[in-house]
Image (cartoon, rainbow, N blue to C red):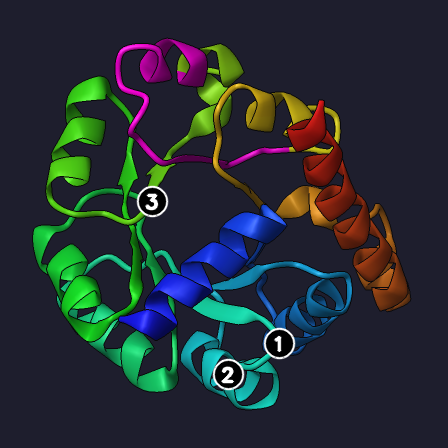
Amino acid sequence: MHEKATNLQRMIDCGVIAIVRTQSADTARAIARAAITGGAGGIEITLTTPDGLEIIAELSREFGQRCIIGAGTVLNATTCTAALRAGAKFIVSPSYDPQTLQLALKSGAISIPGAFTPAEILTVSRAGADLIKVFPSTSVGPAYFRDLLRPLPHLKLIATGGVTMNDAAEWIQSGSILVGVGGDLIPEGAIERGDWDAVSARTAAFVETVRLARVR
């Protein structure tokens, strides 16, 4: 469990998880590597991405000491098992599946189930989730986090799903323990140009935005 606690703290300290969801395995690999170069604390390879498990395994071997590699869109225990075998250190789901959550916890991985309503959020918290992905966050906005955390300050909520450079600081200041960022990590035209340095720079800018938001 020491490794898990260390990984969790590293992700929280950085404050940014890069969410990689593409239609191309090669593009996913390039984005992930660029985000790692930019300083992302975690890389979430969504399992809707072609060869997602293979990418998790590759990144874990190559960057496992440098960045926390995890799996996203994990919908059931079977998929969770496969992701853990590939080397995933955190498991992200869009909703709460009890078997998936318990399997992640028993394996020593970080469990990040999705929840939306106060009842759902409290359910996954009581089930032992390490972090709670409020999804989709952008449909309610940062004020929702402030409202939830006033009576329930123990909750470890993360904003994901549409977080941008324009609102990342507000999410942090509203109580999001970190942010999950996907599409806004990729500047317009960067994929077409193969401009992975731009993705690295954008990732670094997100990390700095979160850092500054925490000290204000």
* Residue 105 in the figure: left or right of residue 29: left
* Residue 173 in the figure: left or right of residue 209: left
Which residue does the numbered mark 3 point to in the structure image? 131
Instruction: Name which residue lies at 38% across and 82% down.
Output: 87
Instruction: Name which residue lies at 66% across and 78% down.
Output: 26
Which secondary structure lies at badge 1? loop
Instruction: Name which residue lies at 50% across and 83% down.
Output: 60
Which residue does the numbered mark 1 point to in the structure image? 66
Q: Is residue 146 magenta?
A: yes
Q: What segment carries the magenta color?
A: 145-163
195 to 59, vertically: above or below: above
Q: Earlier in the sequence, mark 1 or mark 2?
A: 2
Q: Are marks 3 and 1 in contact (CB under 8 Å)?
A: no
Q: Earlier in the sequence, mark 3 or mark 1?
A: 1
User: Can you tell which of label 1 and label 2 is closer to the viewer?
Assistant: 1
Mark 1 vs mark 2, CA separation in Å: 9 Å
The picture quadrant where one finds residue 123 is top left
Neighbourhood count class around disc 1 (C-alpha, 10 Å): few under 14, some 14–19, many 20 upward: some
- Kindly identify the amino acid type of the residue bearing the numbered disc 3: Leu
Which residue does the numbered mark 2 point to in the structure image? 60
